[in-house]
Amino acid sequence: MTAYTVDLSSVTSMTAEQFFMLCRTNPDVKFERSAAGELIIMSPTGGETGNRNFEIGADFAIWNRKAKLGKLFDSSTCFQLPGGGDRSPDLSWVRQDRWDALTPEQREKFPPIAPDFVLELMSPSDRLKPIQAKMQEYMDSGVRLGWLLKRKQRRVEVYRQGKPVEVLENPEKLLGEDVLSEFELSLADVW
C-alpha cells in the first residue's frame, strides 16, 4: 500500500469535523491524518495483504464472539486519537466498557478514542519508518498493545504502553497478554 503525505499546515488547518466531512465527501479516497496534521492519502492493498488481513480478522472475530469483551474494527474505521491524529489501523479492538462510554453520535462518526489494541500488517510497498511512527503515535495516544507484522521478513514488532519495542523473529504465535484475554494468533497462515 502506497501512502502519500500532504502537509497543508502552511495553507490551512482542519478541525475534526472538517476532516470527517472531507472523508465523507470523498468516499473513494482513504484518508488519515497524522498527529502533526499532515493529510495522508492511502492506496488500497494488494491481494496477498488483503487476504492475510481478512484471515487475521477472522481469528479475532471468533475469539471476540466467545469472549464478549469488546468491539473489533477493520481498516475502514478511522479513530480520532487523543494525541491529535485520525488513524485507521488494519485491525483494532476497544474494550466494551470504553466503547459503551461513547455517545451514539461519537460511535457513528470517527470515534474519539484510542483503541486498546491495534494491528498493522505491512504491505510490500509500505515504508518501515512511517509505519513505525504510526505505531508510536498509537502508543502516545493510549493504545495498550500493538503488533506490527512484517510478513516478508517473518518479524513482529510488539508495542506495549510505556515499554521498549520488542522484536520477535519468526514467532509461531502471538499472545494477547492482559489486553486480549486468552487470545492467541497462530502466524502459520500469516507468513
Image (spheres, rainbow, N blue to C red):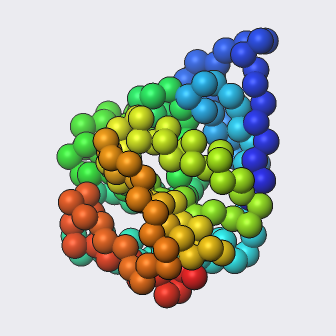
Q: Is residue 74 above or below residue 185?
A: above
Image position, residue 92 (x, y; %):
43, 56
Residue at 41% x, 59% y: name it: 166
Left or right, 84 with respect to 159, comes to right
Image position, residue 42 (x, y; %):
73, 48
Q: Nearer the viewer, residue 186 or 99?
A: 186
Image position, residue 137 (x, y; %):
49, 38
Residue at 34% x, 51% y: name it: 160
Left or right, 6 with respect to 16, comes to right
Q: Is residue 175 above or below residue 101?
A: below
Q: Nearer the viewer, residue 129 or 100?
A: 129
| Quadrant assignment for the C terminus | bottom right
Residue at 49% x, 67% y: name it: 156
Image position, residue 46 (x, y; %):
75, 69
- Examine the image and state in which quarter residue 106 appears: top left
Left or right, 101 with respect to 190, comes to left
- Examine the image and state in which quarter residue 85 appears: top right
Asked whether residue 68 is in view, the answer is: no
Count of marks placed on residues: 0
Q: Is residue 146 above or below residue 17?
A: below
Q: Is residue 113 above or below residue 52?
A: above
| Quadrant assignment for the N terminus | bottom right
